[in-house]
Structure formats: structure tokens, C-alpha cells
Image (tube, rainbow, N blue to C red):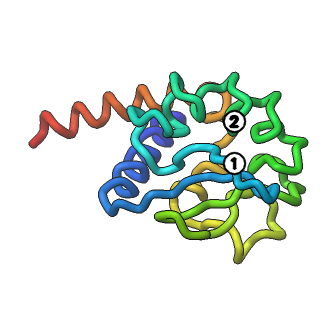
Amino acid sequence: MKTHFTYILFLILFSANTFAQKLELYTNDGKETYLGCLSCDAKETNSIWNMYGTYGNQYNQKSIWNKYGIYGDQTSSQSPWNIHADNPPIVKKDGAFYGYFSMNKHFIGKRVEVELTKMLFEYYLDVKEDPSKWTKATEVIKAKEITKK
């Protein structure tokens, strides 16, 4: 199941980058603190998929992967993973408000419903366990794709 998800995640990330759809996360607390790039490649420093960067590191306070942090804790009102969150992160597309990044069903119609976010909502427990596993797998898949050309 995880292998299947990895392929799907790669395709979503690849297509998001192909169409230059830059989706970035910000806090929804009036300050709009930057939380990283949702659709950026894992090699980019501001990507949530870069485990060595600020926003992909599962121990950093500004990471949605930090299960003890305000933006990654399932009980935090500012976490996308809290199904009751009142202030989930906002998503900006190319700098403009695009919607909310939230599992809270009250935000349906207002939340970002692209394939990437739908997949994260469905598999976030697997991804959150160790985001670096998913980024390593996507790099292997990319290498295979390049050699096929």
C-alpha cells in the first residue's frame, strides 16, 4: 500500500511542479507566518518534503510534520491534521489566497481540494510517521523516469 501511495505522491508532486502551481502554507492566526511550500520539490530548502529544511523537519516548530508542535499536533486548532481545527493553515497559490489546508470537514468548499491535498488527508498518518521515506522514494522514481527517456 505504501509503495502504491509513493507512486501516486510522486505523480502528484511531479505534475504540481510541471504546471508551476506553487502552493505555499501560512498560519491562519492573523500573522500569516510561512510554513513551507506544499508543492515544491524535496530539494528546495522551503519545501515541506525537505527533511533537512525548516519546514520538512519533523522536529522544527514551524513544520506541519512536528507532532508536538502547534502546526503538526492533531489536537492543535492551527494544525491541518486536527479534524476540529478552527484556524488551520491557509494555502496561497502564487502568492494569493487559495483556500485552507485542513482535515476539518466544515472547511469543505473552502479548503484546497487538489489531488495532493486529498492524498495527504487520506494517508497523512503514514506520511507523518516519516516524511523522509516518501521523499526518498520519489527521488528513486524520478531517477527511473529519467533513464526511460
Are there few (<14), some (14-19), or many (20+) residues within 10 Å of tag 2? many
- Residue 73 vertical placement versus 51 (above, below): below
Question: The residue tagged with tag 2: helix, strand or loop?
Answer: loop
- Residue 94 vertical placement versus 119 (above, below): below
User: Residue furthest toward the bottom?
Assistant: 109
- Marks 1 and 2, the one that precedes in the sequence: 1
Which one is nearer the viewer's eye here, 117 or 97? 97
* Mark drawn on residue 18: none
Residue under circle 1?
A: 33
Q: Is residue 110 left or right of residue 131?
A: right
Residue 125 position by quadrant: top right
User: Residue furthest toward the left?
Assistant: 149
Q: Position of residue 40 (x, y in %)?
A: 43, 46
Q: Is residue 133 left or right of residue 82?
A: left
Q: Position of residue 142 (x, y in %)?
A: 28, 36
Residue 19 position by quadrant: bottom left
Q: Is residue 65 left or right of residue 39?
A: right
Q: Residue at x 16, y 37 (%)?
A: 146
- Residue 30 vertical placement versus 138 (above, below): below
User: Residue furthest toward the front?
Assistant: 31
Contact (Cβ within 8 Å) of mark 1 with mark 2 = yes
**Amino acid under disc 2:** Lys
Q: CA distance from mark 1 to mark 2?
A: 9 Å
Q: Residue at x 71, y 74 (%)?
A: 110
**Amino acid under disc 1:** Thr
Q: Quadrant of the N terminus?
A: top right
Residue under circle 2?
A: 62
